[in-house]
Structures are given as structure tokens and as C-alpha cells.
Image (cartoon, rainbow, N blue to C red):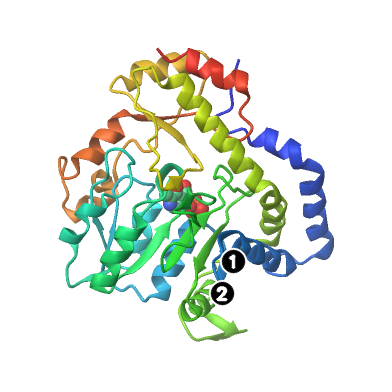
Amino acid sequence: MKIPFIDLQAQYQAYKSEIDEAIQNVLNSSQYIMGPEVNKLEEGLAAYTGSKHAIACSSGTDALLIALMAIDIQPGDEVITTPFTFISSAEVVSLCGATPVFVDINEKTYNIDSTKIEEKITSKTKAIIPVSLYGQVSDMDEINAIARKYNLIVIEDAAQSFGATYKGNQSCNLSHFGATSFFPSKPLGCYGDGGALFTNNDEYAEKARIILAHGSKVRYQHELVGINGRIDALQASILNVKLKYFSQEIKKREQIGASYFELLKDKALSLPFIEKDRTSVFAQYTVRSVQREKVTEKLNLNGIPTSIHYPQPLHLQKCYMFLGYKEGDFPIAEKASKEVFSLPMSPFLKKEDLVFVCQNIS
Ligand SMILES: Cc1ncc(COP(=O)(O)O)c(C=O)c1O
């Protein structure tokens, strides 16, 4: 028995005829870059999130980078984020020549501890990138209030939380910018790389569109130094099919999250903690044990894959040694990185597989 960690094949089989047709239509049209599928995707994403502008782009990383470039982040600037995330959240800051400044996480949610942000603000701080880890949004009201007080820009790294809500509002539409990823394993995933940037600000949106097209609005006229940040029409066409079923999939994710909770609540594990005013899309169903090696070894031996998000916090990564952080600087993130592991999760996870996973945790 081998349970898929994320069952992308079952999802493809469920929508196969529509996805195959969408791909074939793009091939028949020969419109591979930009065009009607990308426009349709942007309209669908804006409608889903309620954000005025949805700008489809080449990846979640590029969505974050474009946002930082749109607000003109420069060498010498500082951007606050969490050390307990995928590398992109900080990498984009470094790509602008600026400095990522880390703040430890909340022990229950694994998101940035909003009570510890203010002490890290200096005259160089320009922005905050809270990461909606595992599919649950951070304390956005508190973070937006800090940003207003110090005149900072907030960019939600919503790579894992597209479809989640905060006080009834959609992730990606909770601050100056939201940036999400359509990497295949994400809650809304394509069959390659893709992402989107969201904003309600017309000026930022216009600048972001220029940046993602090599800094150009008029062909061969480059008013800014930009990037090649476009999404492929093929990926957009796949996302247009999947977006139709996305709300249904979110419900299934919530049901699976609830079933896991029911079957695991009496085990010696810390289960995901979802704040009352939020919903999670469970991009990962991540639990925690001081005996992680023992527990995951048994699961893996029985054909149940597990994964660790993330085994090393960013301040201890080799690429960030030059920032001068050391072990002990962010104890909550460091402890979490030694104890967390994620279980199989997808809207297509079969009930019997879920039960089997839980039976193998002792
Ligand atoms: C928290 C977070 N931020 C950013 C990204 C980057 O997204 P992409 O892989 O589409 O560049 C990811 C993807 O894994 C992520 O998990």
C-alpha cells in the first residue's frame, strides 16, 4: 500500500476531459503567451478573492519579487518576515539587495508572532511579509495596524493559503499586496510554475504589470528594469478549469482536516491550531511530536509518506550565515523545525487511507 502525499493524479482524472480540452484549445490557438486564457484567469482570481487587481505571473516567488520591486525596495532597506517558511519569502528581499529581518513565530499557529514585530522596526524598515503558513492567515489586523503606524507596506505571502479566510475575507486580499503560488502541490495548482499578485491599488497594479513584462508597456520601450514574469497560457487554461471546482475542493479539505482532528485528538501529537476567526485550506496537514523520527519511520515503513515543512529555519541556512544570526535567536521556530511533520493531504485523500494513516500513529 502506498498512499500519495498529495493525490494530483486523482484530481487530474476527475477533470481530465475538461483539462485536456483546455490544453488542446491553447495548442490550436497558438496563443502561448498572455492572451484570452490569462485574461480569463485574472478575472476569475479577482472575482474569487474580491481583490480589484489580480495579476497572473510566473510563480509565487516572482509575485513576491514583483511586489517588492513595485514598491521600490532597494539595497539598505529592511523587510521583516518569519524564519519558519520556504526560502522564497526571504530570498526575494535579498534579490532586491535589501535585508530580511526575522521575527520568531507563534508557537500554536507557526505564523509570525505579531507581538514581536514592533521591536524589530528601524528607520530602514520598509515592508512586512507575513507568511500564511500551512494555509492559515497570520494576525493581519495587528500587522496592518503596525504597518499604518510606521508607514510600511504589507505583502501577504499567501503561497499556501489561496482560498483561506480571515474574518470572512479572502486571503490575498487582506493587505497592500497578496502573493500566491500555483505550484502543482499548492491548494490551487497548475502543471508547472505559476503565481499571482493581488492588490487594490491602481498604481501598484500598473507598475507590477510593467515590471512583469520586462519593464515595458510598449514593445521594445523599457521604462523600468523588470523581469520576465509572465504565466504561460497553457498553465492559465489548466487553472481556469480547476478554479471552477476550487470551492468544492476547499470544502473537502476542511472535511479531511476535521476527520484528521477527530481521529488524532487523543494521540500524543500537537494538531493544527486554527484561530476562531480564520479558516485554513490545509495546504499541509502539519502535526508535531517530540518523537518525530520514531513516528515518521513507522508511517514510512507502512507506505505512508510524510514531509517536513521545514527542517531548518531560514536564519540558520548557509545562504544567510552572513546576516550573523545564531542558534537560539528564534527558539520557537528552531524547536518547531525539529518536531513538525506533515501527513498526506489533498481533497482526493480517500477516507480509508486517512483512517489507515491515523491507525499507524501511536
Ligand atoms: C510560503 C511560500 N512562499 C513562497 C513560495 C514560492 O512559490 P513558487 O514555488 O510558486 O515560486 C512557496 C512555494 O513553495 C511557499 O510555500
Q: Which one is nearer the viewer's eye here, 227 or 249?
A: 249
x, y (%) of residue 334?
24, 37
Q: Which residue is depicted at the point 48% across and 59% down? A: 172
Q: Which one is nearer the viewer's eye here, 324 or 291?
A: 291
Q: Does 25 sit above or below residue 284? A: below
Reading the chain from its start, which is encountered first: label 1 or label 2? 2
x, y (%) of residue 310?
36, 38
Q: CA distance from mark 1 to mark 2?
A: 7 Å
Side of 356 relative to 115 (left or right): right
Q: Which one is nearer the viewer's eye here, 212 or 357?
A: 357
1 and 2 marks in contact (CB < 8 Å): yes
x, y (%) of residue 290?
28, 22
Q: Does 217 sit above or below residue 293? A: below
Q: Which residue is depicted at the point 59% across and 45% down? A: 184
Side of 96 relative to 345 (left or right): left
Report the residue marked by disc 1.
230
In the rendered structure, which amino acid carries the disc numbered 2?
Ala
Q: Quadrant of residue 36?
A: bottom right
Q: Quadrant of the N terminus?
A: top right
Side of 154 relative to 191 (left or right): left
Cβ at disc 1 under 8 Å from ligand 1: no
Report the residue marked by disc 2.
213
